[in-house]
Image: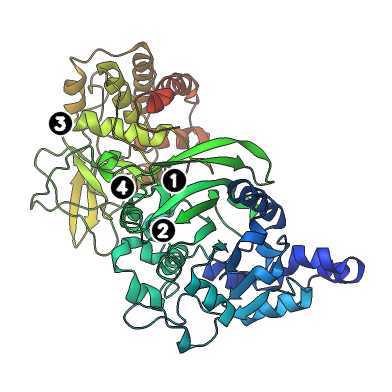
Amino acid sequence: MTAATDSEAVCKTQMPQNCLLEHSDSLIPLNERSFKGAYYTPLNVVDRAYDTLAEVLGKNWQKNYLVWDMCCGVGNLEVKHSNHRNLFMSTLDVADIDVMRATKTCVAATRFQYDYLNDDITDDGKIDYSLTNKVPPALRDAIHAGKKIVVLINPPYAEATNADNTAIGAGAKNKTGVAKTKLAAVAMSRYGKASNELFTQCLARIALEIPTATIAIFSKLKYVNAPNFEKFRQAWNAEYLGGFVVHSKAFDGLKGNFPIGFLVWKTNQTAKKKKLITEISVEVFDKKTQPIGEKKFYHLPNEQFLNVWLKRPRANKVEVIPLKNALVATIGNARVSTWSNKAIAYMYCGVNDIQHATQQTVLFSSPYGGGNGFYVNPDNLWQAAIIFAVRRLVKPTWLNDRDQFLQPTGELTNEFKHDCLIWMLFNGSNLTASADDLEWNGATWSIVNHFIPFTATEVNAPMQFESEFMVNYLQDKVQSTEATAVLAEGKTLWQAYFAEVDNYTVRRELKLNRADVGWYQLRNALKKRNDSGDYDALVSFAAFEVAYKTLTEKLQPLVYELGFLRR
């Protein structure tokens, strides 16, 4: 156990009870809590939770229900409870119980050490309390008699791997072994990827053990709307009663910016007719637990998601260089290293929610080595441009991070399609490029840029571009006023690029060994010129940025109006 801080020492001498309750969670090492995903519930958030429980279960709920918190930690979630004799509190760590004793937290409650995801679970996935004899007889009897029980819980948020659930993708760190529990091994085969999450493991055991429990749970919102939790929702039966979401920053030590939900459910795993979770409406609290509005979270069938809207072209057997960014080859084994018939680009298009879209929506001139994308060709380019734009136009916030992109429900006009294409061409995540002499797998490779919207003559290039695909594709397209302005200012920057020659260092870094450079290469070369001080005049991006911002602001509301996202 860690030593108390100076502020805690002051608390102990001046106002021991209240201050110890506020700081008792800090007596457990932060690195230990972080690995296990255990973040203790702040008392101001507890206040909101008890208000919600009184609203949905009635003001006498503490008298009418037994309460079991099987992840009680140091007891913050129970300090507001007025009927401790109806309270059962268990925790994985004996140190938590020591802290509760020291702080005199819930003295009349039944407190005991219990490993909820490993103890009393048989090899065939049943519950047998005689294996450990840790569960108090009074709680066993109440469960057996079917008494009214509220499971009040803030379970760990840790998962076995976070590679597909954070913005850093394949570079994410694995928490090896953290979700390898007995319950996951023997009782979660029908829950799919939810078996990786400790909080959904808790819900699965509760469903097995107390099939008609009322559950009041703090957790992420994945189990409500994430595509990977479809099997969980099919297996778990619950009716939503009410709740709220609060900013993750309200919890000490919790990294990231996302909503933590406190949702109350009436479960019934024995019912013949299943309650479908289609949407939930919650009150929203900021990180200071002040109300700031309401929000809806939707559960929709996976076949309505945007990531299955486009029919993905098949790969052929032509080997090409796999990339990890615009101009650098994948290191080590690549998931994708072949091309596709008629392909002109590859779009990395990862997880189907706003949280991941910013870093997982990228256009390349050769496959992204990590996969999780699709080949772009002349037939699907209009859809690819819409998918790219829709996924990047709406910025992630702590509240919308798990919102799912949907297939459109409104009419997609030609103007909208063309606007999305121009927006994509000049976006910072359009990493299409050209280069010779790239090295991978013991050979040298070239990549060709098919996404220049101008001819070599228009931008005063010293030689013809290898591909004029985009010029030909745009030839018969009528552009909006906003898109026309972006094209005009973009052409000015292209002309500025060809008006000078970059120094050797820049040419080498950005692989400027061909005329058909990409937007990524061009804009970075111009910025390096401006920073160098070696050129007579700076190249201004101001007019381009104004035009691009205008097009962005035109398209942003259409993401919602056309049904790609729901508010």
Residue ID for mark 1 = 402
Distance from disc 2 to disc 3, alpha carbons, whole Å, reads: 51 Å
Distance from disc 1 to disc 4, alpha carbons, whole Å, reads: 31 Å
Residue type, mark 3 in image:
Pro
Q: Along the polypeptide, which appears first: circle 4 or circle 2?
A: 2
Q: Quadrant of residue 310?
A: top left
Distance from disc 1 to disc 3, alpha carbons, whole Å, reads: 32 Å
Is 34 on the left or on the right of 13, as rendered?
A: left
Residue type, mark 4 in image:
Leu
Q: Where in the figure is residue 389, as x and y percent of width and height?
A: 35, 31
Q: Nearer the viewer, mark 4 or mark 2?
A: 2
Residue type, mark 2 in image:
Asn
User: Do the CB atoms of the residues marked 1 and 4 lie less than 8 Å apart?
Assistant: no
Which residue is at 38% across, 15% downward? 482
Q: Which mark is residue 268?
A: 2
Q: Along the polypeptide, which appears first: circle 1 or circle 2?
A: 2
Which residue is at 19% across, 46% downward? 446
Q: Nearer the viewer, mark 1 or mark 2?
A: 2
Seen from the viewer's position, the closer of residues 509 and 192 is 192
Q: Which mark is residue 378?
A: 3
Q: Along the polypeptide, which appears first: circle 1 or circle 3?
A: 3
Q: Where in the figure is residue 278, as x and y percent of width and height?
A: 38, 42
Mark 2 falls on what kind of element?
loop
Residue neighbourhood size for the residue with mark 2, other residues' Cα within 10 Å, grouped as few (<14), some (14–19), many (≥20): many
Mark 1 falls on what kind of element?
loop
